[in-house]
Image (tube, coloured by chain):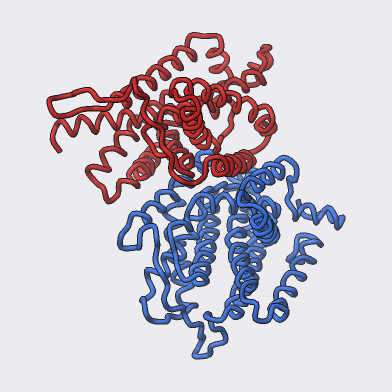
Amino acid sequence: MDTSLFLVQLLNGVQYGLLLFLIASGLTLVFGVMGILNLAHGSMYMIGAYLAYYFTTLTGSFFLAFIISGSIALLIGIVIERFLIIHLYKRDHLDQVLLTVGLIFIFNSIQSFVWGNDPLGVEVPALLSGSIKLTDIIEYPIYRLFISALCIVVAVSMYLTINKTKLGMMIRAGESDRAMVENLGVDISKLFTIVFAIGVFLASLAGIVSAPIVSLVPGMGEHVLISCFVVVVIGGLGSIKGAFVAALIVGIVDTYSSVLLPQISSMSIYLLMALILLVKPQGLFKN
Amino acid sequence: MSIFSNKSEKIFIYLFFVIGLFIPLFLEGNTFYINKLSTIIILAIFVMSLDYLVGRTGLITLGHAMFYGLGGYIFTILAPEYEAVNFWIYTFYVMLISGFIALIVGLIVLRTSGIYMIMITLALAQMTFYFFADSVEYGGQDGLFIYVKPETSIFGLSFLDLENETHFYYLCLLSLFNCFAFFKVIMNSSFGRVVDALKENPDRATALGYNIFHFRLIAYVLASSLAAYAGYLFALQFGFVNPGMMSWDISATALVMALMGGLGSIYGAIIGSFVYEGLHYYIEHLTEYWMFFMGSLIIILVLTLKKGFAGFLNDLSGGKGNE
């Protein structure tokens, strides 16, 4: 592998890793604050992608579709939390698993009912299409750089929100001592709704922005969900910093292994996870 | 003491196996329904093994289908392609090898618990899925075919012909009965009592000098090799194995069936499998989007029917039961 190919793969790996971080951060945030494992998180990624397809076709503008789909995702998050997740706070893990599996079934059938089972695609918006020259011969698509930039913006704003704002203070407090936060007069149920909606929004956002670079197929949500599990397990459940580091590692390992070790490429991230678990059963950054 | 935990269990088990024994007489020649029943019974064995693991030890796995698939693959890979092998000997091989794999996997996953274990079991099952889906040698996505079914002679005497649907049905029914009896014996043994105690209060069990890890590992290995046995039967019935047998939704659906039946009740696994598959069959005929109704039903069940149909039956019959 020569240097330029190495560089392109590195960019691809980082871009994939950042996208994984976007999804995994939502999963780990919801778990960290609310103690809920949302298996339907991957379905929200899928729904985001399909909504982006729908509204891009309808309005003709990807950016308009971006805004509409994002708002719908937030709304879906609020509705699910208010009507379903709210019953799970005093239940065990198994009930969380089963209820969110039920949600996956529902979202999958909605997807196949509305959009059918044939693969669909979204065109890269004209403004971001095209490539930039990295060297004389190597070009890199602008849209992928846009995704990476967007993910970095989200990561930085999450960092600032959690560490510098009042909402972030409540989130951090909710992670360490839920009962105390409640006793201090914070409206915990409102906080939970906000956090869950943010989680759903992050997953959908990832779906929306990756719609132009992946093909939209049934089951895309589950595939992403399981990759996110690997990220979260490696990074340490509930740790956003851990999710960031682990997502980059997983993205890069996945990308390079498909070039260097194609025979085991789809297994590589799971092997990595198993290895890390043997050394650190709680992940790299345990809270 | 009685092997049954409560009256409704006793009535259900008697009714089920008596009806199960005679039903082929009424379905004479209708291989469609006989095959359907065999499939559900195989599923019930798989769900029962999961029900024991989740309901009795409290360890939640979303990767149980990994062993279901492995059971089929172990047989298909080991057995010579065009030669009938002995069913019982290969049952032993399948369970032994899958048990050994479960031992190694258990050493990794049982180091964790709760949410972690759910995610790790799912990820490892997915890894195995990809291993078979990507391997050219084992047929990739299409899997492998079984051209010759095993023969079932013991000391030269053969009662069952696996090519015959009705014979195969009786083999499945017998297997389900053995599986049920096995778990009942385990649950009433001192091993089973310790496992129950660990679920109730792990700290106290540790304080009493029991090594939690060992007990959990044994339960994990037992449940996994029975799941592999179910997968082996499934592969024999349909004549093929493919990576789809290990897919996450098989594990998740089995959990739903165990919940429907009443977690940890063991016989509830039979109820859960029949109710779920019955509903599936019925709704699928009405609409292509049956998953929507199944999903809604699962959510309603989780939010309302806490003890499953087994608990519901028990309440109906006015029994107090053991839980």
Please tell me whether residue A1 is drawn above or below residue B251 in the rendered image: above
Residue A67 located left or right of residue B315:
left
Q: Residue furthest right?
A: B318
User: Where is B131 relative to A152, above or below?
Assistant: below
Query: Up-down: is B269 above or below B20?
Result: above
Image-quadrant location for residue A245: top left
Q: Is residue A93 visible?
A: no
A41 or A124, which is in the foreground? A124
Give the colour of chain B.
blue
Chain identifier of the red chain:
A
Which residue is drawn at the image coordinates 65% and 59% (left, top)? B281
Q: Residue at x 70, y 60 (%)?
A: B271
How far across and how far down the image is residue B79, in percent? 39, 74
Residue at screen point 41% across, 66% down: B74
Q: Position of residue B218 (x, y in %)?
A: 52, 57
Residue A241 picture quarter: top left
Looking at the image, which is closer to me, A280 or A144? A144
